[in-house]
Structures are given as C-alpha cells and as structure tokens.
Image: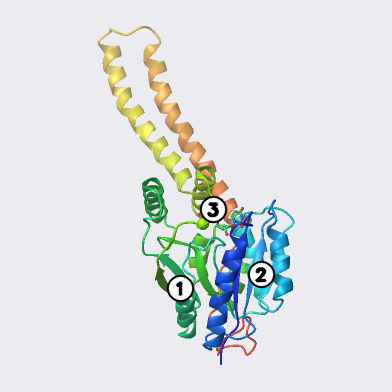
Amino acid sequence: MTHTLTIIIPCYNEEEMLPVSSAKITEELTRLIDTNKVSAQSCLLFVDDGSRDDTWQIIEQLHEKNPVWLKGLKLSRNFGHQHALLAGMSAACGRSEMVVTIDADLQDDIHAIEKMVDAYNEGYDVVYGVRSNRDTDTAFKRQTAALFYQLMRKIGVEMVPNHADFRLLSRRAVAALLSFKEQNLFLRGLVPLVGFPSAKVYYFREKRAAGESKYPLKKMVQFAMEGISSFSIMPIRLVRNLGLLTFLIGIVYMFYVLVQKMSGNTETGWSSLAMSIWLLGGVQLIGLSIIGEYIGKIYSEVKRRPRFIIEKNLYSEEQHHHEST
Ligand code: UDP
Ligand code: MG
C-alpha cells in the first residue's frame, strides 16, 4: 500500500520561480505516483507567506489548471519562512501521511524526495536532507555556517549540520512538532527534539535559479540569534562566569592595592576606590546572572514544550497519533 505525500513549498515573492518550480516538482510527483512510491492523493501545497508580487495569483492559476495536485494556502501577511512551513504542515497533517518541505527556488534536489520516501517506507519518521556540498555558497557563508553549528553544539543544541528545512516528516512527527507551542520557531533545533527514528539523505545543492535570496545577511544573523536564544540560556551563564572572573581579579588586585598602600605611595582614597570597582563589579555581574538564571527558568516554563512524546503504546488501546502500517 502506498502512502499520501504532501510537498510543502513556502513562497515569499517567488513569481519568477513559481512557474518553473511548480512544473518541475509536479513532474517529479507524477513520477513518484506512477512508480507507486506515493499514493495518487498526494499533492503540492504552496504556502504564500504574504507576498507582495503576483505569487498568489500564480498559485490560484496553477490550482485552477490542476485542482487535484496543486493546492495553495495564503497567509494574511508575511509571517516568515518558519511559520509558513508550520502553517503548511498543520494543514497537511489531517490528510497526508507524510510531508516534505522544500524551498521554492529549487536549490534542493527534488530527486532526493524519492530517497526520503524510501526511508519513510523503511520506518523512519524524520528524514533530513543534508547537503553534501557547500560550494554554491560564498566562503563567508560557509565559514559562518560552520561556526554557527560549532557554537550550537557547544551550548548543547542538537542540530544536523548542513541540513536546512528540506526534510520529510511522518504524520505523527508533524503532530508532535505541532505540540511545541512556542512563538519563536527554529525548526532545525526543534525537529531533533521530536525524537522518533530518523535518517539522513544526502544531496547536491544548486545555486538559486531566479529571484533573490530572501535571507540577506541581516536576516541570517537574526535567525542565528533566534536559534541560540530559543534553545539556551548559555549567554546568561557567560555573564556569571564573567562576574566570577571579575571578582577573582578584584581579590588579586586587592592584595596589590594593599601592598601599594602599605608602602605609602598612593593618593588618599585611591585604594578603597580601586578595590571596590572590581569587587563590586564582580558582585553585580554575579547578581545579574542569578536573576538571569530565574528568568531563564521562567522562559523555558512559558514555552510549554511537551514534556514527553509517546512513540508506541502497548498500554491503552486508543492511539493518539496515527500509526502507519
Ligand atoms: N520564504 C518565506 N517567507 C519569508 C522568506 C522566505 O516563505 O519571509 C521562502 C522563500 O520563498 C523560499 C524559502 O522560504 O521558498 C527559502 O528562502 P530563500 O531561498 O530566499 O533562502 P536561502 O535559500 O537564500 O537561504
Ligand atoms: Mg534558497
């Protein structure tokens, strides 16, 4: 038996890319249906993320021409790539056994979708598309990306290196992902938290064929900051360590100041001032980080992330998530 696949394509001002990418991806989907990899109810779902150009008109036309395979969803404004993906997954969850998310610019290899479906059929719930090359990026982007992955690993966030938002998720993985109710979405960090068996599929990434990147440097930095601050209170710990260091320097400095004072070559008042600057500075930073620890706790509490996700249940008959056969 074959399963239903929805290919979710977020679109923000993609009028140049859409006709090409919809044709190419439809062709690939047709092939998958014809070779019995996925069911005939499978479809493409374009999510228009508040585009200012003719993106939605194009999606409507595509849907009119092919209402079975080409579907659309229009968000009321620009919510950002991550939220567009979430909207698509939330819509697809009810009618589709698996979803693949892929960018509209065809940088990701659409032939990898077949390998993802194969992995799904082998029992994997999460299949990450991983780039086996980064030579279409500038040296700067490559290096900053490598640095970012290193930093994330250091602060304890599990991420798949060289994986963007090109991935397959089973229905129960989507359902689990949707139970993360946080406002600040960083899917690359969240998906590994969902658990379930996961696999990787390697592919070559192309250059953007038309249109411009919707991720200029400023957005990239914002995105990275988002990733760090949504998953870690490490920056607060950094302040604490800085405070401890300052305090320690203060103590050492205190001896130096006392020696100076005893040898009599200091101005009146200098010793007490010099000492208190360092000691108090240290105490203040430590105090700030203690407050920060509590704010960090409040922060993780208000996110209301699920505390567990069940994969299999031999205890009660009723299954929360659909189990594929
Ligand atoms: N995108 C979106 N909303 C945004 C920005 C981008 O839906 O606010 C879509 C965009 O149309 C594309 C995908 O997200 O399909 C990835 O964007 P892009 O290719 O510009 O990013 P890059 O590949 O340069 O990182
Ligand atoms: Mg792109």
- For residue 254, say whether it is visible: yes
Q: Given contact means CB atoms under 8 Å apart, are the residues at marks 1 and 3 in contact? A: no
Q: Is residue 271 left or right of residue 314?
A: left
Front-most of residues 199 and 36: 36
Q: Which mark is residue 112?
A: 1
Residue 186 falls in image quadrant: bottom right
How is colour applied across the structure in the image? rainbow
Compute the Cα span from label 3 to label 2. Answer: 21 Å
- Mark 2 C-beta to ligand 1 under 8 Å: no
Mark 3 vs mark 2: give the one in front. 2
Name the residue tied to disc 3.
230
Count of labels in the image: 3
Mark 1 vs mark 3: give the one in front. 1
Q: Which quadrant is the C terminus positioned in? A: bottom right
Does dot 3 land on a helix, a strand or a loop?
helix
Q: Is residue 80 left or right of residue 200?
A: right
Residue 316, given in percent of the width and then of the height, sits at 61, 88
Does dot 2 land on a helix, a strand or a loop?
helix
Q: Which quadrant is the N terminus positioned in? A: bottom right
- Mark 1 C-beta to ligand 2 under 8 Å: no
Instruction: Report the residue at 45% width, 57% height from top.
Output: 207
Q: Is residue 54 left or right of residue 262?
A: right
| Image quadrant, ligand 1 | bottom right
Residue 322, given in percent of the width and then of the height, sits at 61, 83
Farthest bottom residue?
1
- For residue 176, say whether it is visible: no
Q: Which mark is residue 90?
A: 2
Instruction: Report the residue at 60% width, 83% height from top.
Output: 4
Q: Residues within 10 Å of mark 1 (few under 14, many from 20)?
A: some
The relative height of residue 51 versus residue 202 in the rendered view (above or below) is above
